[in-house]
């Protein structure tokens, strides 16, 4: 598996992976699915977008961008998505590691995650294993697809 910058020919697979996570309703705050038109604009607008390619197919991706603007613009934020049929093979770990390197290359000083859902145990354990620090919890900060609310956690990592 290799992690690399995305190419236009990856967009269809990237859109399917991203939309799968949105449809699951368990990790991303977005509710609107990407279309071919909106996906191209969305992914190209990021500071960096990368894919995990395995056996010639896109298995996952991440988007990297500032977490805020101006005086807080040195803090990065990243979202990760792995195709459900490819989960459990450490693709997410490779995406996170690559994003930390890329964020530092792009001049960011910190990485911050604003809303890691409490039930997303695998992501929370991965972030902690890779040196992220949990800095807080927002009670019932995430509305799950079925309508119930879960706590969300904030994490950061010095680059």
Image (cartoon, rainbow, N blue to C red):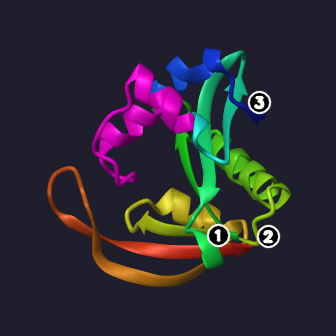
- Which numbered mark, 1 or 3, is in the foreground of this view? 1
Residue 21 placement: quadrant: top left
User: In this rendering, is residue 92 above or below 137?
Assistant: above
Which residue of the protein is positioned furthest toward the right in this rendering? Answer: 105
Q: Helix, strand, or loop for circle 3? A: loop
How many marks do you count on the picture?
A: 3
- Residues under labels 2 and 3: Cα distance? 24 Å
Left or right of 120 in this view: 77: right
User: Which of marks 3 and 1 precedes in the sequence?
Assistant: 3
Q: How many neighbours does mark 1 have within 10 angstroms: few (below 14), some (14-19), or many (20 or more)?
A: some
For the point 43% across and 59% down, the residue is: 120
Q: Determine which residue is flagged by label 3.
A: 1
Above or below residue 27? Residue 136 is below
Residue 62: x and y in percent read 61, 44
- The relative height of residue 159 versus residue 16 in the rendered view (above or below) is below
Judge whether residue 24 is colored magenta. yes
How far across and down, in percent of the image, does residue 15 sit?
A: 47, 27
Q: In the image, what residue occupies the spot 72% across and 52% down?
A: 99
Disc 1 to disc 3: CB gap under 8 Å: no
Vertical arrangement, residue 81 with respect to residue 57, above or below: below
- Identify residue for label 2: 159
Find disc 1 in the rendering and name its residue: 73
Comes first in the chain, label 2 or label 3:
3
Residue 55 forms part of the magenta stretch: no
Q: Nearer the viewer, residue 32 or 16?
A: 32
Q: Would residue 94 be seen by someone viewing this image from the given angle?
A: yes
Q: Which of marks 2 and 1 is nearer the N terminus?
A: 1
**CA separation, marks 1 and 3?**
31 Å
Q: Residue at x 57, y 41 (%)?
A: 45
Question: What stretch of residues is rendered in magenta?
Answer: 17-43
Location of residue 100 (image quadrant): bottom right
Q: How far apart are marks 2 and 1 (CA)?
A: 14 Å
């Amino acid at each position: 598996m290799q992690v690399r910058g995305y190419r236009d020919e990856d967009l269809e697979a990237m859109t399917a992976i991203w939309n799968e996570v949105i449809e699951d309703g368990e990790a991303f705050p977005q509710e609107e699915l990407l279309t071919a038109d909106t996906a191209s604009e969305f992914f190209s607008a990021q500071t960096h977008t990368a894919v995990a390619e395995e056996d010639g197919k896109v298995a996952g991706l991440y988007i990297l961008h500032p977490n805020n603007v101006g005086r807080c613009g040195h803090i990065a934020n990243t979202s990760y998505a792995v195709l459900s049929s490819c989960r459990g093979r450490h693709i997410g770990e490779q995406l996170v590691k690559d994003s930390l390197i890329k964020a530092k290359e792009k001049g960011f000083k910190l990485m911050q995650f604003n809303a890691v859902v409490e039930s997303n145990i695998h992501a929370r354990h991965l972030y902690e294993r890779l040196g992220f620090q949990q800095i807080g919890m927002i009670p019932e900060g995430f509305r799950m697809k079925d309508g119930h609310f879960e706590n969300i956690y904030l994490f950061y990592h010095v680059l």
